[in-house]
Amino acid sequence: MTSAVRLIRSSTLSDVAEYAYAATAPKDSRLIFLAGACPLNDDGTTAAVGDYAGQAAKCIENLAQALADAGAGIEDVISTRVLVASSNQADLGTAWQVVRDAFGPHDVPSTLLGVTVLGYAHQLVELEAIAAVVD
């Protein structure tokens, strides 16, 4: 199936960013607004305590499941926001690399933020996303 999402890359902005600068979807798309994917196990415990990469991977896993439940896949994501509980750029980079690798060539517009705290005990990473599909 072809994705409704069209990524837009700029030839005039820096190519250092590892994502498209914008994305569009046709007007007849169904938008899917996902709650922040948290690094929670099925039993509600926090996965990969103390591990930014491990928590980012669990967030991707949970995001993929929420997308599937909504009738979408990772290729239908139109934008993301990655929240990392740290003021250390290396920690943000660690989480970002996992997310970036998971999206592969579907390098959607993204924002990476360092925050002071997230909602669950021992939570270091959260991944927000919006997807678009044509039914």
Image (cartoon, rainbow, N blue to C red):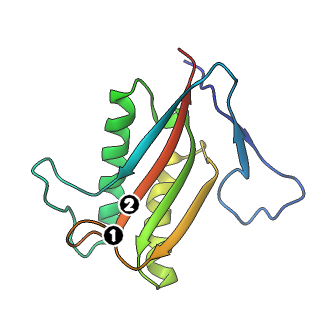
Dot 2: what SS?
strand
Q: Position of residue 104 (x, y in %)?
A: 54, 46
Task: Name which residue type carries label 1.
Answer: Leu
Task: Name which residue type carries label 2.
Answer: Glu
Which part of the image, by quadrant, shows the N terminus? Answer: top right
Q: Earlier in the sequence, mark 2 or mark 1?
A: 1
For mark 2, what is the residue?
Answer: 126
Dot 1: what SS?
loop
Residue 47: numbered disc: none
- In the rendered image, which quarter is residue 125 located in? bottom left
For mark 1, what is the residue?
Answer: 118
In the depicted structure, whether residue 75 falls above or below residue 41: above
Pointer 2 with pointer 1, Cβ within 8 A: yes
- In the rendered image, which quarter is residue 73 located in? top left
Q: Is residue 107 left or right of residue 131?
A: right
Instruction: Report the Cα–Cα distance between label 2 and label 1.
Output: 8 Å
Residue located at (73% from left, 66% from top): 16
Residue extending farthest bottom: 88
Residue toward you, 34 or 87: 34
Residue located at (22% from left, 66% from top): 48
Label 2 vs label 1, nearer the camera:
1
Residue located at (42% from left, 71% from top): 84
In the depicted structure, whether residue 16 falls above or below residue 58: below
Question: Badge 1 local density, few (<14 within 10 Å), some, or many (20+)?
Answer: some
- In the rendered image, which quarter is residue 78 located in? top right
Residue extending farthest right: 12
Residue located at (49% from left, 64% from top): 96
Q: Position of residue 119 (x, y in %)?
A: 29, 66
Q: Is residue 25 left or right of residue 49?
A: right
Question: Badge 2 local density, few (<14 within 10 Å), some, or many (20+)?
Answer: many
Q: Position of residue 11 (x, y in %)?
A: 88, 53
